[in-house]
């Protein structure tokens, strides 16, 4: 891969070397909750870019019980769990291996059951010191675009790597730009019982993650991630001047869906928080892959919104009543 | 197809005759809102049964803008719109045809733009006089299992047809059995600001439909269809004795996910409405396809719950503030 100026993660490279020896017919993206949400952009990429390889995305336990007939020796199953201990995802790894599939685990914990059970694992970085190119969403893209290059001679990997190399500075600038807006969001929404999120295409997973992980799990605020295209076929009847919406505008091909949803919401809603990737300084991100990179930036910025909301509510993001505390 | 005792719909049969002449590589299920939700069970069926043919399900406008690379001459695109006028779905039909795909439209209106633009259309019955075997979910299954028989020699169609033939009597008995429970549901929930629904596998679309069409669209009640497997990775932190949940238990392979979600919810929630397909009299439904038929029964019974909720709230299911009334 001499055309890559920026090298892929060395553990990803090992996976790609193995993939060169194999025929892959389909890819399954398998994880739970936030770890599943970070795979949505890769499903979008596969749909847009893959000529032969097909893909599906399932919550781990659904994957096991649904038992897709296409799962077999020509399958690649990519799994993710931050701690590497999520029981359903560890189980899904064993299940996929038993079917003869190649399994690759993403995790922050190389000593975890997930890493130990998978054929390959890739450790991603996490936390304030981690550089964006080494974090979970970026590693997912290195795997996905790497697979596309190895298996289908797709030429986007170099552009993605060059862009990911510059992603940290994009994050830093976006976070600085959004500081006041995030604080304002926290102040305005601290007493709201429900907050909807909305997006489409590669950005939908970001809305989903904010809805189920940040709002429902970490803040005990009611929520639902509405697909911007589905909005006009049911959900939009819920909006009025009292109902808060976070509307994401990305840069991919489905942006017209998000723009239409925003335009309607501006007429009948009042409590709107709009994050538009167009307004961020994306210097260093290749023009051709901006649509794919936007969800990563939106996701990072939304975390700042979550932090400010938690501050205002005196409800730390780490607070739980059931998770890790009771049997389930 | 001499092994079929009960004949498939004659328009479905025309589609199947055409399919015998073609090679189909992939199927796209394309529609919006409730018409999309009724295709979820068919996606589940394809995942479980199809050896070669792969499938995906998209909201119509997402389908157009995502523009899946696999869409082409060996694609079958199944679209649905009750009125046949949903602009995005009509547009998706033209889009798919331009790509060389075979298009089949399901609609209640044979004279509609959707029916006229698609290569084939199938009119389904609707309303109180319609027999279950001729309604939308059943017609979808005739197409899906018909395709599987024609293209892959799958042998489930005869069992499905025999079961669909008996579905009306299953509906009638289930509706009678649930009369009191539906009334009680309406009374207990008339002042609730939010009601969650939950299911997995082939039943998830039913939960989704009730959430976005019945609750959000027709009753202006906040909602979100939670996937029973995802529940434990975020959403479950929202439940307490004050938060109402409708939990569906089907009969397919993912039932353990729904049972686990119910079991947890019974410990920490109080306002639970449980619809368990096991408790219905499924006489005449083939044992081997009960899992596939359960969502149809759950969906029909839930409509009765919707009616009673609407009665109690003096908010007719036909009432809208935006749909058909303003530009969008």
Image (cartoon, coloured by chain):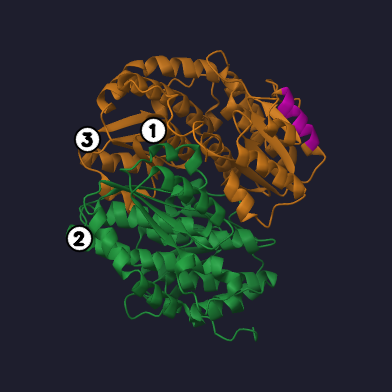
Chain colours: A green, B orange
Quadrant of residue A288 in the image? bottom right
Q: Disc 1 versus disc 2: distance between alpha carbons?
A: 31 Å
Query: Does residue A36 show up?
Result: no
- Above-or-below relation of B137 to A198: above
Q: Are marks 3 and 1 on the same chain?
A: yes
Q: Disc 2 versus disc 3: distance between alpha carbons?
A: 30 Å
- Above-or-below relation of B19 to A270: above
- Indicate the chain on which mark 1 is placed: B
Quadrant of residue B138 in the image? top right
For residue B270, which numbered disc appears in the image?
Answer: 3
Q: Nearer the viewer, mark 3 or mark 1?
A: 1
Q: State the SS at label 3.
A: loop
Tell which of A20 and B79 is nearer to you: B79
Given the current orientation, which residue lies at the most extreme right position? B21
Q: Nearer the viewer, mark 1 or mark 2?
A: 2
- Indicate the chain on which mark 3 is placed: B
Q: Are marks 2 and 3 in contact (CB under 8 Å)?
A: no
Does the magenta portion include B16? Answer: yes
- Indicate the chain on which mark 2 is placed: A
Q: Disc 3 versus disc 1: distance between alpha carbons?
A: 20 Å
Q: Which residue is mark 1?
A: B215
Range shown magenta: B10-18
For residue A312, which numbered disc appears in the image?
Answer: 2
Tell which of B94 and B295 is nearer to you: B94
The secondary structure making up most of the magenta span is: helix
- What x and y, as percent, mark residue B70? 69, 55
């Amino acid at each position: 891969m001499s055309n890559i100026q920026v090298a892929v993660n060395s553990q990803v490279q090992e996976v790609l070397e193995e993939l060169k020896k194999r025929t892959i017919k389909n890819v399954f993206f398998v994880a739970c909750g936030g770890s599943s949400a970070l795979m949505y952009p890769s499903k979008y990429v596969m749909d847009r870019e893959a000529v032969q390889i097909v893909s599906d995305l399932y919550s781990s336990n659904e994957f096991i019980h649904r038992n897709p007939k296409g799962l077999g020796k020509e399958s690649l199953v990519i799994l993710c769990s931050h701690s590497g201990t999520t029981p359903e995802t560890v189980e899904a790894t064993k299940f996929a291996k038993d079917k003869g599939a190649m399994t690759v685990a993403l995790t922050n914990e190389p000593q975890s059951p997930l890493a130990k059970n998978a054929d390959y694992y890739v450790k991603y970085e996490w936390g304030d010191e981690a550089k964006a190119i080494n974090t979970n969403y970026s590693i997912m893209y290195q795997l996905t675009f790497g697979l596309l290059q190895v298996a289908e001679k797709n030429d986007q990997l170099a552009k993605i790597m060059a862009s990911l190399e510059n992603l940290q500075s994009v994050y830093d600038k976006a976070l600085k730009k959004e500081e006041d807006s995030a604080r304002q969001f926290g102040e305005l929404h601290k007493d709201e019982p429900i907050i909807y999120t909305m997006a489409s295409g590669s950005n939908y997973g970001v809305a989903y993650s904010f809805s189920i992980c940040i709002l429902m799990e970490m803040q005990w605020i009611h929520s639902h991630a509405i697909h911007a295209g589905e909005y006009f076929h049911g959900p939009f009847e819920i909006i009025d001047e009292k109902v808060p919406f976070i509307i994401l505008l990305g840069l991919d091909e489905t942006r017209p869906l998000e723009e239409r949803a925003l335009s309607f919401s501006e007429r009948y809603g009042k409590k709107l928080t709009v994050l538009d990737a167009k307004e961020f300084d994306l210097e260093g991100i290749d023009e051709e892959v901006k649509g794919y990179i936007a969800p990563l930036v939106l996701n990072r910025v939304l975390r700042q919104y979550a932090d400010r909301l938690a501050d205002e509510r005196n409800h730390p993001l780490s607070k739980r009543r059931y998770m890790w505390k009771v049997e389930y």
